[in-house]
Amino acid sequence: MSGAFRIYRYHHPDGRAKDWAWREDPGRTLTVRWGPAGRLAQRKTYPASALGRIGQTLQQKLRKGYVLLGEHRLDDQGRLLEPVLASTPGIPGVDVSPAIDLSEVETGIADDWF
């Protein structure tokens, strides 16, 4: 398939994820795809006049918690042709703590002991 899809991902609290994507096709149609994360096997094609309806669906998805992954090309089976970098900031309920820097901790032991 040619043309990039705008892909959005929703992360379930149990760790599963699902994707929803859409694109404008060259033939004045719109294609929507959805499925488990990385496998958007289901699809439906709409006339260009359905753009408003797809926009409403997108707004509902965003309110639910979907986050934009970016624009990516898919193969005919709905698999991503380019890898998506793993990013967890958009996962609700996951607290990503900063790395702890122990270099400033005062231990009372000289640094030159070895």
Image (cartoon, rainbow, N blue to C red):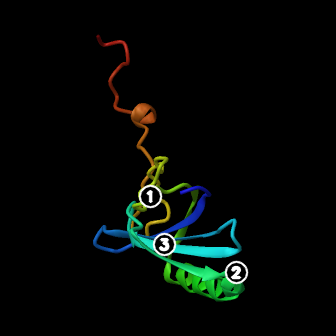
Reading the image, the residue beneath label 3 is 33
Q: Amino acid at mark 1?
A: Thr
Q: Position of residue 57 (x, y in %)?
A: 58, 85
Q: Is 89 left, or right, of 17 in this rendering?
A: right
Q: Nearer the viewer, residue 92 or 79?
A: 79
Q: Position of residue 60 (x, y in %)?
A: 56, 86
* Disc 3/disc 2 C-alpha distance (Å): 16 Å
Labels 3 and 1: the sequence-earlier one: 3
Q: In the rendered image of this protein, does residue 86 appear above or below residue 109?
A: below
Q: Amino acid at mark 3?
A: Arg
Reading the image, the residue beneath label 2 is 48
Q: Nearer the viewer, mark 3 or mark 2?
A: 2
Q: Is 54 left, or right, of 37 in this rendering?
A: right
Q: Which of the labelled discs sits on residue 88, or is there none? A: 1
Q: For label 3, count other residues whose C-alpha is less than 10 Å away and answer few (under 14), some (14-19) or many (20+).
A: many
Could you tell me which secondary element the residue under label 2 belongs to? helix
